[in-house]
Image (tube, rainbow, N blue to C red):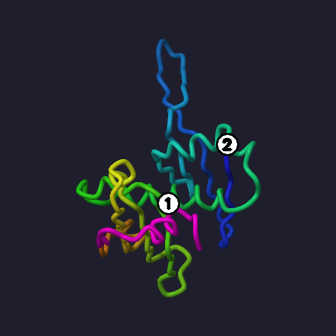
Amino acid sequence: MMKIKLINGDVAVIEPAYNCVFENQVKTCTIADGEVIYSRNNKKVRLNSLELYDWLLVGWKYESVGAPKDELLEETLYTRYFSHLDKAYSDFVMCPKIDKVERINGDTRRHIIHASALNYSAHHGGGLFDRIHITLTDTPENGVKINKVTIQKGISDKESRIQYRRES
């Protein structure tokens, strides 16, 4: 389990997810492979993130202090927002980044998020990557609303390495 203290004092929790079954008044729970629960303010969201799941179970033991935890949080947030996209964009799952977060009128609960990721198929195809850019609004009253989606075709090797965080 990972606890994250947010600037506003709230605590968010990320932990492995479990599947539970009741049989003959006995509850049996097994860990859900590749799934995590993101909890904040008594709201729980079940997310698919094999990388974060693996890290929570064993990866943290081998990790140095620094950026990888930030990257895992970015992946989790991206996964939350990615689930609101049309299925036509299902290939854009590699190297997710939260590029920018803007508060709406200074409110800590209302944000405009700018996110990006690379297409998975280029990873195996040997061609140039495409990059998706997503702009969305996340507010308590309206939830997640996708405002704009653009695809940048055939980005350069340098740009894809930056997205991979191999260059700055």
The N terminus appears in which quarter of the rendering? top right
Q: In the displayed orientation, state which residue is furthest to the bottom.
A: 105
Residue 61: image tag:
none
Question: Foreground residue, 32 or 108?
Answer: 32
Q: Secondary structure at mark 2?
A: helix
Quarter of the picture containing the C terminus is bottom right
Q: Badge 2 is on which residue?
A: 59
- Amino acid under disc 2: Gly
SS assignment at label 1: helix
Amino acid found under the numbered disc labelled 1: Leu
Q: Which residue corresponds to the image point at 48% horizontal and 76% vertical from the top-left? A: 110
3D distance between C-alphas at marks 1 and 2: 19 Å
The correct choice, above or below, for 57 with respect to 113 in the image is above
Q: What x and y, as percent, mark residue 17?
A: 53, 38
Q: Which residue is mark 1?
A: 77
The residue lying toward the viewer, choosing from 62 and 19, is 62
Q: Which region shows up in magenta?
A: 149-168
